[in-house]
């Protein structure tokens, strides 16, 4: 799920919204909260396109990302955290200390943006 989300993000594709937890109900997939989903699919592609341009990602970078393999995650109940240890060294460098946090809802994983793309909390 994390890989599909990242590829959709780099492609500035509204399909990224299909892989996310709702903005307003953190226990519900975005696709099940009509207002959030409509807002996400309307605004996210433009925001992502600007971010991709700002980071200088090109078509070759997007193609490379599609080859990304994520192996495992730190799972605790219905929460999974993907960090640099779960991706190849090439991608680990770009992820840095940031993590991608997923929440399981009805057996399926969704990216939780509120808890993703931040350095891990100190232990």
Image: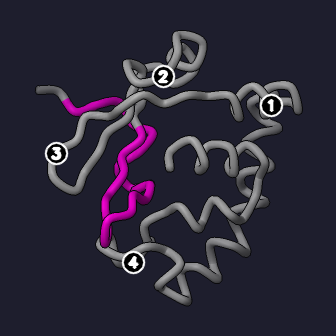
Q: Position of residue 59 (x, y in %)?
A: 88, 32
- Nearer-N-terminus badge (2/3): 3
Classify residue 86 as left or right of residue 51: left
Inter-mark Cα distance, 3 to 1: 32 Å
Residue, disc 3 = 76
Residue, disc 2 = 87
Q: Position of residue 34 (x, y in %)?
A: 54, 89
Quarter of the figure with residue 44:
bottom right
- Nearer-N-terminus badge (1/2): 1
Q: Is residue 104 magenta?
A: yes
Residue, disc 1 = 63
**Residue, far top:** 89
Quarter of the figure with residue 86:
top left
State the residue at coordinates (31%, 72%).
106
Helix, strand, or loop for circle 3? strand
Q: How many marks?
A: 4
Q: Is residue 20 above or below residue 58?
A: below
- Nearer-N-terminus badge (4/1): 4
Inter-mark Cα distance, 2 to 3: 19 Å
Helix, strand, or loop for circle 4? loop
Q: Is residue 90 above or below residue 58?
A: above
**Marks 2 and 4: which is nearer the front?**
2
The range drawn in magenta is 100-121
State the residue at coordinates (59%, 50%).
5
Q: Position of residue 84 (x, y in %)?
A: 42, 21
């Amino acid at each position: 799920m994390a890989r599909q989300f990242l590829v959709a993000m780099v492609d500035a594709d509204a399909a990224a919204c299909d892989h996310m937890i709702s903005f307003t109900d953190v226990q519900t997939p975005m696709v099940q909260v009509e207002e959030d989903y409509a807002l996400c699919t309307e605004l996210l592609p433009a925001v992502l396109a600007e971010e991709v341009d700002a980071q200088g990602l090109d078509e070759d970078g997007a193609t490379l990302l599609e080859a990304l393999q994520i192996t495992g995650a730190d799972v605790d109940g219905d929460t999974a955290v993907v960090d640099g240890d779960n991706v190849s060294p090439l991608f680990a460098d770009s992820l840095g200390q940031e993590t991608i946090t997923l929440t399981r809802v009805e057996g399926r994983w969704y990216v939780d943006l509120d808890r993703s793309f931040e350095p891990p909390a100190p232990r």
